[in-house]
Image: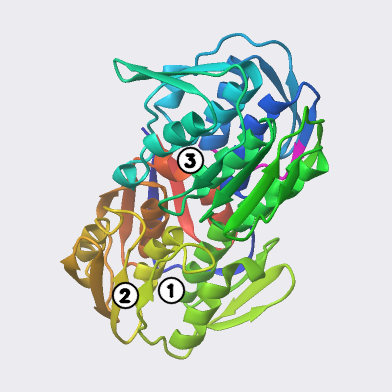
Amino acid sequence: MSKFIINGQRPLKGEITVSGSKNAALKIFPVALLTHEPIKVFNVPEIEDIFRAQEMLIALGHEVKKTGKGAFELKFKNQKSADLPAGLVNKFRASVMFVGPMLVKFGEVRFPHPGGCVIGAAMRPIDMFVDNFEKMGAKVELSNNYYRLTAKKLKGADIFFHDITVTGTESLMMTACLADSETLLKNCAMEPEIVSLAEYLNSVGAKIEGAGTSTIKIKGVKKLRGGEYKIIPDRIEAGTFAMMAAASNAKIDIKNCEPKHLEALWFLFDKIGVNYKLSKDSISISPSKKLLAYDAKTHEYPGFATDLQPPYTVLMTQAYGSSLIHETIHDRRLLFTDSLTQMGANIVMADPHRVVVNGPTKLYARKLVSPDLRAGVALIIAALISRGKTEIDNIYQIDRGYERLDERLRNIGADIKRIS
């Protein structure tokens, strides 16, 4: 198993480029099941979750051909099976996105309960997907923790999401494109990745209205064409780099991003005194005189993203005063703060969903294990500003969402290396 070795407190300076959005790129692979025509996709991050999505598409009968850096052509060959391979389903939770397209296109899909990241497992039940496919006319069978869904033809339905869900919104939206009649989705997630997906689907023949609002209307069509899709920049990566620069008091320019997707973070930066400047597609962070503590509460988009909470918590260890961090989206996401406490942070857990961070504090190197994707990158930021040599194990979790992160950090001055 690989690990990162990081010697902290090295001055950071320079430019770092944001990759394509992981959460947007993951959805184009199941969308490829909806057409027999080729899809050309660009700006794809070459990360572990994307590799698993490619393997899933190939296992289901498609060809995935790399045509350049971050560029792929997805092309239908033949349907090999109605089964989603258990080995892949258990490796990444986004595998659930293949269920709807398989069902609406081929009439049947079989799969075990999805695995992947442990964060929020209790808050992302598979029942939400299964129940809504049932509303659209699917027959659902469950045996030995294995699902079998069948439908001669899915029909449009009026669907209300009890909890706001990004993957649920995307899954039902793409599936409804080939269902009979009209589907109305209510209480939808509004993330930029959903808007991007809807724009692509409309460009290849879908009829979707309202993406980016809480109500989305989809009128079913007979077929979708192939096309070209450029993945939008990863807003979570951009925000993470911005907080890394602020925490390390560095001068860093973050390129190839969409600052307008991060307005909740800029609100917090204004409150805590981060010295930053925005342009159309870049963010410039300069050293700040003094960072002030400020409370943060995660919320669905356009609120403060839960995926940005771990690096913000690290940033607050360097701010003057006390800040209350309230995680409202995922359970267990604050458990990583125990690692920060081991490094010297003054953090008090009020309850499983709230911590109080008192700062500023000096952090010291430790041997750590990355518990999940977003906490893992937060621990890297903590290691970069710590005294001494930090080891971070289980970095597969980090590789799931960040492409060549160690290489990009070295380019701006970080002393970080990967060892097996």
Left or right of 115, for residue 349: left
Question: In the structure shown, which secondary structural element does the residue marked by tag 2 occupy?
Answer: loop
Amino acid under label 3?
Arg
Residue that sits furthest to the bottom in the current view: 289
Residue 233, percent across and down? Answer: 66, 55
Query: Quick check: 103 above or below 298?
Result: above
The residue at 51%/73% (across/down) is 265
The residue at 33%/47% (across/down) is 123
Amino acid under label 2?
Thr
Label 2 sits on residue = 317
Look at the numbered discs 2 and 3 and tell me whether their residues touch, using CB distance below 8 Å. Answer: no
Q: How far apart are labels 1 and 2 at the CA level?
A: 9 Å
Look at the numbered discs 1 and 3 and tell me whether their residues touch, using CB distance below 8 Å. Answer: no
Q: Can residue 34 be seen in this view?
A: yes
| Foreground disc of the pair 1, 3 | 3
Q: How far apart are labels 1 and 3 at the CA level?
A: 24 Å
Pick the residue in front: 45 or 171: 171
> Reading the chain from its start, which is encountered first: label 2 or label 3?
2
Q: Residue 247 carries which label?
A: 1
Query: Quick check: 112 above or below 271?
Result: above
Residue 341, percent across and down? Answer: 21, 65
Label 3 sits on residue = 400
Amino acid under label 1?
Ala
